[in-house]
Amino acid sequence: MELVLEVLSPRSLDRRRDAEEILSLWVSQIPGLAPDRFGNWEPVAERFDLSAAVHAWKWPFLARRRAPPVSATVFMRHGAEPQHSTISLKFELDDTREPDLVSALPGFVKALAVTVNADFGLLHLMSESEVERALRSGTARIIDRRRRTADFHLTTRDLRRFIPDLYWGSLLGRPYVERFGREHLLQTPATAVEELENGSIWLQLTQKISDVAMHPENFNRVRDVAKLHLDKNSFFDPELHPQTRDFSGRSPAEVTQKEEAWYRMHEYSLPQFVFEGNEES
């Protein structure tokens, strides 16, 4: 099964000390999933060495592991537009055969989120039904239509529109703590609700991440109750948007205009983001 882990930070994350902190944390917290190759383009072929990887830390930074399969991409803030830096890892794991590796992931995403002062983070299992949910919100893109395979990737643009979903594990940083309120967040009906040392809140909906695929009805029921508690109007609701999406156009500007019009069919209740070196809503 594919597990996805993403962390979005308001920091630029383009310094060598950022690379040292992030890569050292990865290697120490989940050594059984540490990379064996790295690079800045495909194919990723350079044998992993921490010092060499730190020196190669630039946009985009790629890392891979053959077994168990791990694919990681780090997009540091790039260009003048205020946006999050994104750390994205994808794992092929089974919590029945590799329980120790899977059980280490929540601790890693929480530690990583604190290290980079994340605004948002997630740990989730991408079952077939979860891929369909992500396709509807626009956070997954079809990469092979014949095999119906999709790539999940969360961006600042998504978070400026809505919170796409609650995931098995969701990390809500300062903007969301301010939006929902600390006490209200801590009262969320979920299996685990934890305040981290930097004030972020970790929400874990059920006991096992495999519940997403093995017990989808119960998982969705827990998710819906948690969303209702927080504020349903902050989360993407497909019923508030037309089922048909036509983003075709004769120019990129026309495509963007159609896309934004579809997403702006409903105004969601959202937080303010403040980026390192910028103030942006």
Image (cartoon, rainbow, N blue to C red):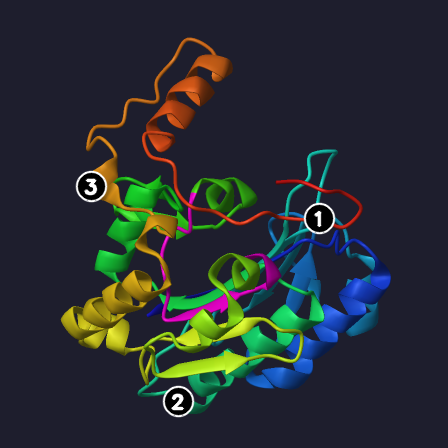
169 magenta-colored: yes
Q: Position of residue 51 (x, y in %)?
A: 83, 70
Question: Label 2 crowding class (10 Å Cα cut-off): few <14, some 14-19, many 20+?
Answer: few
Task: Using the image, tell me which numbered label, if any, was put on residue 160.
Answer: none
Give the residue number, with chain letter if any, for mark 1. 275
The reply to whether callout 1 and callout 3 are in contact (CB within 8 Å) is: no
Residue 42 can be seen in this image: yes
When the figure is inspected, residue 11 is found, relative to residue 142, above or below; the finding is below
Q: Please name whichever residue, 137 or 152, is drawn nearer the observer in this view of the structure.
A: 137
**What residue is rendered at 64% in x and 43% in y?**
83
The amino acid sitting under disc 2 is: Pro
**What residue is rendered at 34% in x and 49% in y?**
233
- Span highlighted in magenta in the image: 162-175
Q: Closer to the camera: disc 1 or disc 2?
A: 1
What distance separates the C-alpha of mark 1 from that of mark 2? Answer: 37 Å
Residue 89 can be seen in this image: no
The amino acid sitting under disc 1 is: Phe
Give the residue number, with chain letter if any, for mark 2. 99
For the N terminus, give its image quadrant. Answer: bottom left
Please tell me which of labels 1 and 2 falls first in the chain: 2
**What residue is rendered at 70% in x and 50% in y?**
76
Give the residue number, with chain letter if any, for mark 3. 239
Please tell me which of labels 3 and 2 falls first in the chain: 2
Q: Please name whichever residue, 39 or 235, is drawn nearer the observer in this view of the structure.
A: 235
